[in-house]
Amino acid sequence: MVLTDDARPGLVAGTGAVPAAPAATPAHQAHPATLREPGAGPTAAHGPRIPGLDGLRAVAVVAVVAFHLAPAWVPGGFLGVDVFFVVSGFLITTLLLREVAGTSWIRLPRFWVRRARRLLPALALVLVTSIPVARLVEPDLTVGIGRQLLGAVTFSTNWVEIAAGTDYFDESQPELLRILWSLAIEEQFYLAWPVLLVLLLITVRSAAWRVRIVVACAFVSAAAMALLLMPAYGTGVDPTRVYYGTDTHAFGLLLGAAVTLRWAKAGPALWGARARVLPPLALAGLVALFLLLRGDSPLTYPLGLLAASLLALVLVQACGAARAEPTWFTAALEAPALRWVGERSYGIYLWHWPVACVVNAAVGAQPGTAWWGVGTGLTVALTVVLAAASYRWVEMPVRRLGFRGALRALLGAVRTAAVVPKAAVVVAVLALVGTGAAVTSAPGRTATELAIAAGVQAAAGQAAGQDASTPTADGAGEPAPTSRTGGAAPDRLPFGARRGAQVSAFGDSVLAAAAPAILARYPRAQVEGVVSTDWLDAERMIRTAKLEGRLRQTVLLNFGTNAGFQLEGSADAARHVLDMIGPDRRVVLVNSVGISYWVPDANKTLDQVAGGRENVAVADWHTLVDEHPGLLHADATHPNLDGVEAYTDLVEESFAALE
């Protein structure tokens, strides 16, 4: 359809649909699609650029990067994505209404081509660079890369990963292209919203009702998020479905669009004295959410996300009003550094996560250590350099010249025998070939998964091979310890020298990964390492072993990999486990490693649980990994081949300390 000055519907460019001619509209009656009233709309109220928005983008991208690099310090930094959603909904609707107000047309193909020019060059560069580099540095990072690449090129990453059952908040599963989920939601919005906006302008007469309808849709989206999570509220259930879903996470985009529609009705609000107070308070509230809100909090979905979106909405309105009513606050957001980062925020967002995955895999250090600081600094530096280079030499040429124009310019430079363009072409070809090779040769399972599977199999085989003389709970039948020469071992022989020592080991996937090394050190040990277990499961496992007479005099417990003591009642369950084991058995508890924010608190709680029990020792696996980088797989959680030996040495020393 054509939105003409008198708003008579005709033909929408690119659709080929011709509706029936409408009834004539009296001259004194405004048609529902009329947007060219004097002074109305973003075009009349603003120039081509809205001050402060680049600074707001900078704040959002810094929050997201900080969350991924240091989640313990900025646990709510993921809310920066919701700020991006509000800004995107506002800007895209502004562009569309400017086109309507200026030409009475919405040229859908032209709009989509402009979006492609904006999004595709940087995305393509990230894909063809990060995938082959990740394959060379750490093959685990390319497990499932074919699926991820499919989601990236079709802008469906969010739905592809929902179908695959991935967990956005699981730091132990570093998917290389994870962050593209939000780009997928935005691109789906870019495809659908122009069509829906045209329908809204044509079918709804009242400008006020247009705003109400869009706001209502936003709150329906937020309500859907709450309703889908309500059955599992407070149980620690994975929120990825509602976080990734376009249907449940579109409210930020829609709220941003609603602001623009409101301006089309009345122009941007002039806040007067409130402009000096509300925007700084909104930014302070947003920063507080970045620092306090956590991804595993039930309050986050949707209340926390909605609160961040509404605060971002205040900031967007302040930026919009600043052209007519400048303030010190928007002037601060226009600071050169913030504006520079904001202009490159798209590239920074795309680059930071793949770079972090590769650097972390190469460095292999735990948070808080010196090597972790080196890796974090290197990640930030590489991200900024790559985003700046992409912006200057890839993104901007395509924006200015278009795809064909940029390609012609590159080919023209190559024909002039310039070295740099020729090298760029060679590198691009190698990157494409490398990407194809990386995708086709990517492993089907991570080294962690293979190690856990091998450990489970080894433990099962060892248990099946043990004879009926397995010791009972009181230790009857336990053979006398022998020395390595075959003679009787002295009473105070170190525990590690007692190869016949009877050990009962219970734990999660970390214990499962270490099982082969434990069984090699203690061939008569019984190891029960079960994936995704926690201290609540430990109660059941210990109770069953005790009832069946399988609980030995020496016990190893390694729980806490899955949320530590975050689940309600976990600390009490751990204490109950030690009470069931009793004071007459030697018990070693292994603490946790990982980049999750809760790891330090979990280890402090474990020390408190063990405190005052003379038969219990804590094996400080966390400190050992901190002091010796390179003991973990790429997931920064499970021990690798060197790690399982170090783990077993630590367990042996801890048992010996109890004698």
Image (spheres, rainbow, N blue to C red):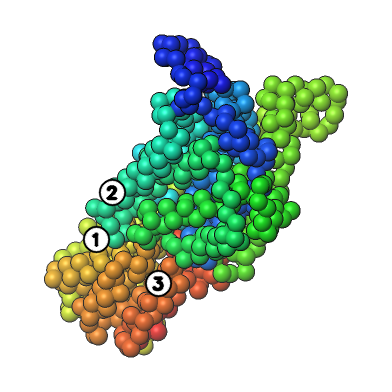
Which mark is on residue 227? 2
**Nearer to us in this view, 344 or 274:** 274
Q: Classify 173 as above or below 613.
A: above
**Nearer to us in this view, 219 or 399:** 219
The quadrant of the image that shows the C terminus is: bottom left
Quarter of the rendering containing residue 220:
top left
Badge 3, how many Cα within 10 Å: few under 14, some, many 20+? many
Residue 203 appears in the rendering: yes
The residue furthest left is 547
The answer to which of marks 2 and 3 sits earlier in the sequence is: 2
What residue does disc 1 label? 463
Residue at x-position 33% and y-position 88%: 612
Q: Classify 75 as above or below 154.
A: below
User: The residue tagged with tag 3: helix, strand or loop?
Assistant: helix
| Cα–Cα span, label 2 and label 3 | 31 Å
Which mark is on residue 602? 3
**Nearer to us in this view, 370 or 227:** 227
Pinpoint residue 347: horizontal percent, then vertical percent: 63, 43
Residue at x-position 69% and y-position 55%: 331
User: How many numbered marks are there?
Assistant: 3
